[in-house]
Each structure stands twice: as C-alpha cells, then as structure tokens.
Image (cartoon, rainbow, N blue to C red):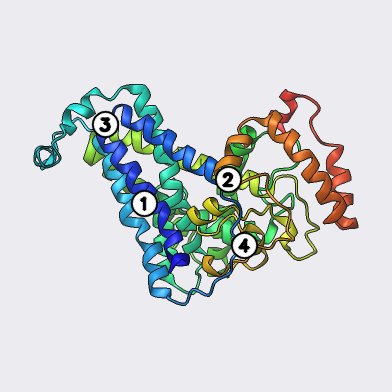
Amino acid sequence: MFHYLKFFHYFVTILIGCICLLFGGHFIWLGFLTFIGIYVLGDAFLGDDVSTPSLNNTKLLNALLYSAMPLSLLVLAICMWLVTPYQWMGVAQVSEFFGYDFVAAKAATTWWQLAIAVLFCGFLLSGAGTVVGHELVHRLRSKFAVSMGRWLMSLSFDANFSIEHVYNHHAKVATSEDPVTAPRGRHVYSHIVRAIIGTNLSAWNIEKKRLSRKKLNVLSIHNQYLRGCAMTILWMVLAFVLASWQGLLFFSAIGIMSKIILEVVNYMEHYGLVRDPKQPVKPKHSWNSNRKISCWAMFNLPRHSHHHAKASVSFDKLEPMQDAPVMISGYISTIAVVLIPPLWFKLMQPKLAYWDNNFANEQEREILRQQEQQQPTNFIQSLLY
C-alpha cells in the first residue's frame, strides 16, 4: 500500500499550499518557504528510491492522476479569490465557520506577497497540471486521457505540448532538431525563450503537415494547435469572469510561470547531451534522478532515462536505471542550481566529462567536437547561444 500512498503526498502538499494561499498575508511566503524546504531537504537527506513494485490497481492509479484536475481548479479558484474585486457568495459563512476573516486577510495581502503567490502557484500547478498532463498525453490509446492532459497543460499555456513533446521531442531528443535540448554553454534564461518559441513552431508545423496529409484546412476546427490555444483562452475568460482584469492578469502570470518552470526542467533533463540522429534514443540521452521526494512528487518523472528509452511505459512502471547518467540532485534542488548559471556550469563540468568518456560513442564525440567550436566564450555570447 505504501507504494500507492507515496504518490499521494504531493496532492497533500498542494492542499496545504491552498490553505496557506487562502489565509493570505504572511501565510503565503511561509507556505512557499515550507514547500521549497520540504523538497530541497528531502532530496538532500532522504536518498534514492530504486524500488520497482508491481502496482496492479490501475483504477486507484488513474483516480490519483485524474484528481489533478479538481485540485488544479481549487488552486485556480483560490488564486482568483486573492485578487477579485467582487464579493463572492458564501465567503462570510466560510469565515464564520473557521473563525477567520478571509475578506480582511485578502485585503491585507500586499503586492509582494501576491508576487510570491505567483511563484508558489506556478510550482503547485507544475505538479498537478504539467506533470500529470505529461503523463496523460503519452497515453495515446485513450482519447480521454490525452484530452484531459491537454486541458491540464492548457492551464500553463501549453496544451500543444501534447503535439510537440510526443511527436518531436521524443524522436529528436539530444539532437539539434529538438528545441528543448540545450547545448553546452547555453544559459537557462536564453534557453527558456528559445524553447518556448521553438516548441510552438514545431507543434504548428507538425499539425500543419498532419492536416495536409488528410487534405484538411489548416485554419479549421480540425487544427489541434488552434484548439489548444482556445483551451487556454477559455481559462482566461473564466479568470476574467471570476476576478475581472486582476484575475486575468494573475492567472496569466501563474500560467506563464508554470510554463517557465517546465522549460527549466526540460533544460536540466537533457543539457549538454548529444545523439547521432541516425541512432536510437537510449537511457544515456537523459539525465536521471532517483531521489525519493522528487520521484514521489512527480510520478517518477525524474526516472527520465527510462521514460525516453520507452515513452509508452506508464509512470508506475518506470525503472530507476542506475547505470544511466545521474543528475546533480533531485528536481527542485536542481532547479535552484540551474538558475545560477556559473554554479550550474561548474557542477555539470565533471558530469559531462564523465558522460563523454563513459557513455558517448565515436559519432557523438564528433558532434561534441563540432559543438565545441561554436560554444560561447563570454556571458553576452552565452545569452545569444
């Protein structure tokens, strides 16, 4: 039973985060610091999870995944409450029940606390929306799963992740044709912009080719890219209805933050790795992590090497792949390091050298030699690389 329950803990964290956001004021930054502390310290001290249990209760696993939607809606509703200029029905009764004046708490919440709330909610939606959405869009045999995954990803302005990620990233990973594989020497900040532009162009071109093969008009209801954009627009309309322009602005900021977090994760999952496009994708083409707290929180997504070796395998069957290249830590901790490029480059240098000597074949070493001639030599060049 433990191996089922361990995947529930992130939703408990989300509920605690929702309570902190609802109480407003100082509870917001205290909740955020607690959230970060749990995952950074958990990665540091709880060690690895290399277990491979047989989880046969698919109904429970599916219920766990699909509960991400109501939880995401709860996060969204609380976010809208924090900024709405309207008086929502029932809030007075809720305040009386809990003995806490939520209206006064909202009024006392400052702009900088709301700014922290954007970052906090970005992480919460990244877990409930992006991670679960990623799992669901890979379930190509179920239209319902893919659709639900797209709706979850649309909260972070990224429903079309289901097109680009599945049909391009997994085929082109660790090559120059993959927008989210960062070459060595590229800063994460420039990579975020390049990845967002590149993945959207890629998704559009993939869908354009699909429609062309079927002799369907690109500018039509059949265009999944346009339908993905419409999903996000519907969320934006809902935010406006609930909380006017303040809600629209707040929702947009949170959605963009979630998207940025996704691209930071993409950056660190494949940074500096290369592959001959003529050769198959192997576990060595992704940085792997088996840290307990990260794997439990992200439905084994850190077991990324196995995920790329066999993309159709569900999260509960991903294996630790202990012979794969290892990330410097768990996901949350690594995100913090990535945001400090000089530290990131320094820590990754020995890992990349080890990969070159122990994982790369001759074709990949030749690609690395060619890339080395193009690497930036100063900070400004690295921003443009």
Q: Classify mark 4: helix, strand or loop.
A: loop
Q: What residue type is labelled 3?
A: Val
* Image quarter of the C terminus: top right
Circle 4 residues within 10 Å: few <14, some 14–19, many ≥20? some
Disc 2 to disc 4, C-alpha distance:
15 Å
Residue that carries the numbered disc 4 in the rendered image: 50
Label 2 residue SS: helix
Query: On the rendered structure, is 215 left or right of 276?
Result: left
Evaluate if marks 2 and 1 touch, with contact meaning CB atoms under 8 Å apart: no
In the rendered structure, which amino acid carries the disc numbered 2? Phe
- What's the CA distance linking mark 2 and mark 1? 20 Å
Quadrant of the snapshot with the N terminus: bottom left
Circle nearer the N terminus (2, 4): 2
- In this view, the mark in front (2 or 4): 2
Residue for badge 1:
12
In terms of sequence position, does the residue under pointer 1 or pointer 4 come before the other?
1
Q: Name the residue under label 3.
A: 83
The residue labelled by disc 2 is 45
